[in-house]
Image (cartoon, rainbow, N blue to C red):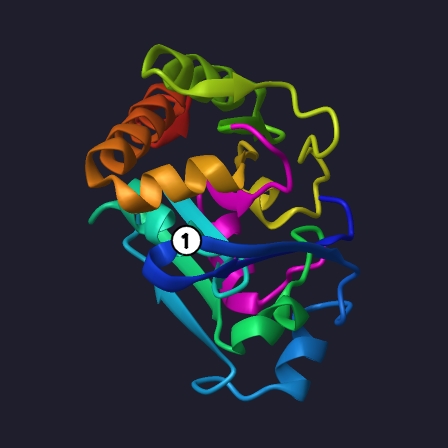
Amino acid sequence: MLPLMLALLSGCGGNYAALRMRPDLYPDYAALRAANTEGRDFSREIYDRKSRVSVFAIHGGDIEFSTSRLARAVAGSDFNLYLFNGWLGGDSWKLHVTAVHFDDPAAVALSTSSLIAVSIHARADGGERVCVGGADTRAVGETASGLLASGFSVETPCRRTPGVDPRNIVNRAVEGGVQLELTPKLLARLENSPAARMRFAGSVRDSLYRSLPAVQDGVLR
């Protein structure tokens, strides 16, 4: 991702009050952690369910509002899940570390132990659509096709933020990853409509299952 801050702040009733673009304050996770207190300024949730798929929302909480909720829906009770949530209110943009520099050891461990990973982000664009990028071209294609068939507006490839850098946390999985960037209007709809959120999440889950390499006698085929 570009080294830009996408701070999505929630207003009353889950509405979006502001969308800002800022440069990252911290160069990596270690610098962020040294300057902030976990449990007060930010929180993490790490669920290693020994799945071949990991789901990430590294800009959750008040950084990119509702991305963590959507990541939970995609992960369900079986995929691995990593959430980083910022809790500084209107200053939560300060806790944004771009995906290529987000190197929390717990997140790296979860990604590198998976075959495929998917990450949920906000995208500073108008309209109501999702941009599907990432280094796993098979999974990207499956995910884009599935979301389109499920009635969502899809952009792929992502011209501005293709998400193919190998340092991107989502691409540290064995097969690479899928980066989903949703516009504020789409995030708002999914936040306010559980049915739409589950349709979106179900489509992504089905696509990831279809994209998993076959395993025979312990060997990937």
Residue corresponding to mark 1: 15
Vertical position of residue 54 compared to residue 128: above or below:
below
The residue shown at (67%, 87%) is 35
Q: Disc 1 residue type? A: Asn
Q: Nearer the viewer, residue 212 or 200?
A: 200
Q: Quadrant of the C terminus?
A: top left
Q: Is residue 123 left or right of residue 160?
A: left
Q: Quadrant of the N terminus?
A: top right
So how many labels did they put on this image? 1
The residue shown at (37%, 16%) is 146
Magenta segment = 101-127
Residue 106 image point, x, y percent:
50, 66
Residue 3 image point, x, y percent:
78, 52
Q: Is residue 174 visible?
A: no
Vertical position of residue 191 compared to residue 129: above or below:
below
Q: Residues within 10 Å of mark 1 (few under 14, many from 20)?
A: some
The residue shown at (46%, 51%) is 56
Residue 202 image point, x, y percent:
26, 30
Vertical position of residue 12 compared to residue 179: above or below:
below
Q: Is residue 74 left or right of residue 16?
A: left
**Residue 110 painted magenta:** yes
Instruction: Name which quarter of the figure residue 204 lies in.
Output: top left
Q: Secondary structure at mark 1?
A: loop
Q: Nearer the viewer, residue 106 or 87?
A: 87
